[in-house]
Image (tube, helix red, strand yellow):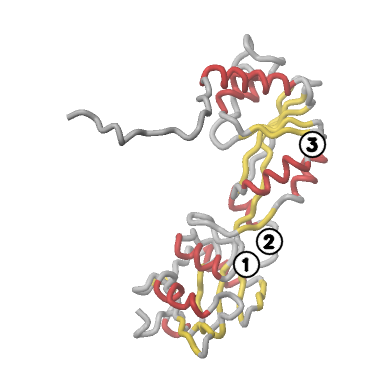
C-alpha cells in the first residue's frame, strides 16, 4: 500500500547535528588551552550535588577559576594518559584520577583559600531517597496550617500516609509522628514527608581529591574522609522536633544510642515508622 502524502514529518528546526569527532576535538583543545592559564588543577567530588550551587560557584569564581564537568575521557586525553602523551610532567597521574564522579577545577587560588571559600558554599537542601538521615525528625500533633492548605489533606492522608483530618478548614495531625530516625537510610516516602514539613537534611559539599601544581609538577593527594563522618562530625544536633510551626533542634544521646545499636523502627501497615503503641506513632484505626 502506498504511503499517504498527508502523513509527512516536517522538522521545524534547521539546527545541524554536531559532528561527534569535531566536537570532541574542539573540547580537548579547549581544555588544553585552559591549562596555560591556571597554576593549580584540582580533582574533586561532591556530596548531594545541586546544580544551582555549582552555577553560582562558577559565576563567583569566573575571574580566576574554571570548572570542567565534561566527559571524563576527554579530560584524560587532553591531559595525557601516560608519560609519553602528558602535556606537563606528572600530569597523567592526575588525569587518571578523573573518572566516575570525580570532576576537574582549574584555578589560581592557593589551597588555603580554596578550602576556606568552598566552606561558604556548603548548603542544605531537601534529602532524596537513599540519603542518610542526619537527624531524627518528629512532628508533634496539632495544626499544620504553616505547612499545607486545606486542599492538601487528601494528599497527606493517602499519599504520605499521615494521620490527619480537616477541621474547620485547617489540617490537623492527629498524633505525634516520627518521620525518620538518626542515621536512617531514607525512603522515597520519608523524603516526601520531610519536604512537606520543610526539613532540609542533605548538605551540598565539595570534597577535594587531589591537586597538581604546575611549578612543582607534582600531584598531592588529600586525605579522604568517611562519607558518614564528613556529614555528621560538625553537627550540633541529631533531633528535630516540629510543633506548631516551630523547629526545635537538640542533641539527644538516646538517638545516638539507637543508631549505634542498629535500632530499626517498626513499620505499621501504612508504611509509617512506629516505636511502640505507647508512643502514639501508629496510624489510628479508620485512617486507612
Identify which residue, 20 or 64, lies in the foreground: 20
Determine whether 193 is above or below 168 in the image. above
Proximity of marks 1 and 2: CB atoms separated by less than 8 Å: yes
Residue at position x 68%, y 55% from top?
Answer: 123
Which residue sits at x=53%, y=62%? Answer: 260
Asked which secondary structure carries label 1, the reply is loop
Cα–Cα gap, marks 3 and 2: 25 Å
Q: Residue at x 52, y 20 (%)?
A: 19
Residue 255 at x, y = what percent? Answer: 57, 70
Dot 2 lies on which element?
loop
The residue that mark 3 highlights is 111
Q: Classify the position of the N terminus by image quarter.
A: top left
Is 194 in front, or is 114? Answer: 194
Q: Which residue is mark 1?
A: 238
Residue 158 in percent (x, y) is at: 39, 73
Is residue 4 rendered to the left or right of residue 201?
left
Q: Residues within 10 Å of mark 2 (few under 14, many from 20)?
A: few
- In the rendered image, the residue lying farthest to the front is 5
Tell me the CA gap for discs 3 and 1. 32 Å
Marks 3 and 2, the one that precedes in the sequence = 3
Q: Which residue is mark 2?
A: 235
- Return the residue nearer the eye: 283 or 262: 283
| Left or right, residue 93 beside residue 217 | left
Q: Which mark is residue 132?
A: none
Name the residue at the bottom extreme: 168
The image quadrant of residue 160 is bottom left
Choose the circle earlier in sequence order: 3 or 1.
3
Q: Residue at x 65, y 25 (%)?
A: 94
Viewer-proximal residue among 224 and 187: 187
Q: Residue furthest left?
A: 1
Q: Is residue 76 above or below residue 245?
A: above
Amino acid at each position: 500500500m502506498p504511503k499517504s502524502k498527508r502523513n509527512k514529518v516536517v522538522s521545524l528546526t534547521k539546527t545541524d547535528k554536531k559532528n561527534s569527532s569535531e566536537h570532541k576535538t574542539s573540547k580537548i583543545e579547549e581544555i588544553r588551552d585552559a591549562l596555560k592559564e591556571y597554576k593549580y588543577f584540582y580533582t574533586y567530588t561532591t556530596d548531594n550535588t545541586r546544580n544551582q550551587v555549582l552555577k553560582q560557584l562558577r559565576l563567583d569564581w569566573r575571574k580566576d577559576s574554571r570548572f570542567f564537568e565534561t566527559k571524563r575521557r576527554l579530560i584524560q586525553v587532553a591531559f595525557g594518559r601516560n608519560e609519553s602523551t602528558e602535556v606537563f610532567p606528572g600530569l597523567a597521574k592526575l588525569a587518571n584520577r578523573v573518572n566516575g564522579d570525580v570532576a576537574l577545577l582549574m584555578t589560581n587560588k592557593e589551597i588555603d583559600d580554596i578550602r576556606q571559600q568552598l566552606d561558604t558554599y556548603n548548603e542544605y537542601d531537601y534529602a532524596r531517597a537513599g540519603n542518610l538521615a542526619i537527624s531524627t525528625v518528629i512532628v508533634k500533633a496539632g495544626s499544620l496550617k504553616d505547612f499545607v492548605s486545606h486542599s492538601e489533606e487528601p494528599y497527606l492522608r493517602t499519599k504520605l500516609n499521615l494521620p490527619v483530618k480537616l477541621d474547620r478548614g485547617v489540617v490537623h495531625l492527629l498524633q505525634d509522628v516520627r518521620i525518620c530516625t538518626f542515621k536512617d537510610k531514607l525512603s522515597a516516602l520519608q523524603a516526601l514527608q520531610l519536604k512537606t514539613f520543610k526539613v532540609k537534611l542533605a548538605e551540598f559539599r565539595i570534597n577535594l581529591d587531589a591537586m597538581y601544581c604546575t611549578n612543582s609538577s607534582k600531584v598531592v593527594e588529600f586525605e579522604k574522609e568517611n562519607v558518614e563522618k564528613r556529614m555528621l562530625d560538625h553537627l550540633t544536633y541529631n533531633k528535630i522536633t516540629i510543633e506548631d510551626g516551630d523547629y526545635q533542634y537538640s542533641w539527644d544521646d538516646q538517638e545516638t544510642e539507637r543508631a549505634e545499636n542498629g535500632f530499626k523502627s517498626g513499620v505499621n501497615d501504612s508504611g509509617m515508622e512506629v516505636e511502640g503503641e505507647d508512643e502514639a506513632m501508629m496510624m489510628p484505626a479508620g485512617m486507612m
